[in-house]
């Protein structure tokens, strides 16, 4: 069977990033980028545009692929692959009635303090830096859903201050 495929879209404006506090599982009460599953008829880019519009009301002028990460969790029979995008130009009005979560613009330098999934905290600096090549990594969790290993698929080091 094929892995489950997802997108995450990180909108940037004025040194802020748009994140969503999840109101339901998975990741309830944690801050994540808008996004969602890729439908069988969609490319990752198409899914990123659709998910961003559905979750936020924003339509990106262009999406930039910044990373591809695989998450392996013993609780799930299949790994999930996440295509990580950054958008810096978009149109539309931010939704205030999102059923999935609460949207908020956070200063980039404050995001490291937010409660978020462990993998997101590891890759977010790479994705938002806008420098370097495509970030690729495999994140492995234990049976208690605790991150136990990060295998980088390129030469990017794990950011300082990140603990496993």
Image (cartoon, rainbow, N blue to C red):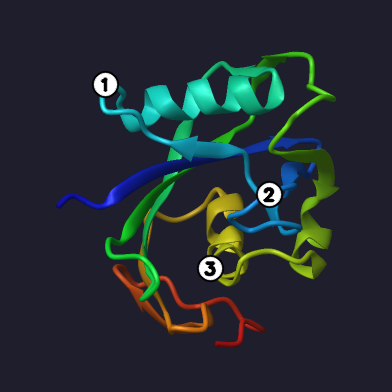
Q: Earlier in the sequence, mark 3 or mark 2?
A: 2
Relative placement, left or right, of 90 versus 17 is left
- The residue identified by callout 1 is 41
Q: Which mark is residue 16?
A: none
Mark 3 to mark 2: distance in Å? 18 Å
Question: Hey, which residue is sitting farthest left in the picture?
Answer: 1
Residue 138 appears left or right of 121: left
Task: Give the label, 3 or 1, closer to the camera.
Answer: 1
Dot label at residue 119:
3
In front: label 3 or label 2: 2
Task: Give me the C-alpha separation between circle 2 and circle 1.
Answer: 26 Å
Q: Residue at x 26, y 28 (%)?
A: 40
In the rendered view, would you say 32 is above or below 140?
above
Give percent across and percent down for residue 104.
83, 40
Q: Nearer the viewer, residue 126 or 26?
A: 26
Which residue carries the number 2 mark? 24
Element on which disc 2 rests = loop
Residues under numbered marks 3 and 2 in contact, where contact means CB atoms less than 8 Å apart: no
* Position of the C terminus by quadrant: bottom right
Sort mark 1 into few (<14), some (14-19) or many (20+) by Cα contacts within 10 Å: few
Give neighbour class at mark 3: few <14, some 14-19, many 20+ (Cα, 10 Å): many
């Amino acid at each position: 069977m094929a892995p489950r495929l997802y997108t995450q879209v990180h909108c940037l404006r004025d040194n802020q990033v748009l994140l969503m506090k999840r109101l339901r599982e998975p990741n309830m009460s944690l801050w994540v980028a808008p996004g969602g599953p890729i439908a069988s008829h969609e490319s990752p880019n198409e899914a990123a545009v659709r998910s961003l519009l559905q979750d936020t009301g924003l339509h990106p002028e262009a999406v930039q692929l910044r990373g591809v990460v695989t998450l392996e969790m013993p609780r799930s029979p299949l790994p999930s692959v996440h295509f990580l995008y950054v958008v810096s130009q978009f149109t539309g009005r931010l939704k205030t009635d999102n059923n999935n979560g609460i949207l908020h613009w956070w200063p980039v330098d404050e995001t490291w303090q937010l409660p978020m999934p462990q993998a997101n905290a590891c890759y977010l600096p790479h994705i938002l830096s806008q420098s370097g090549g495509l970030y690729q990594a495999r994140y492995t969790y234990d049976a208690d859903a605790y991150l136990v290993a990060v295998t980088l698929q390129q030469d990017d080091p794990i950011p300082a201050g990140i603990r496993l």
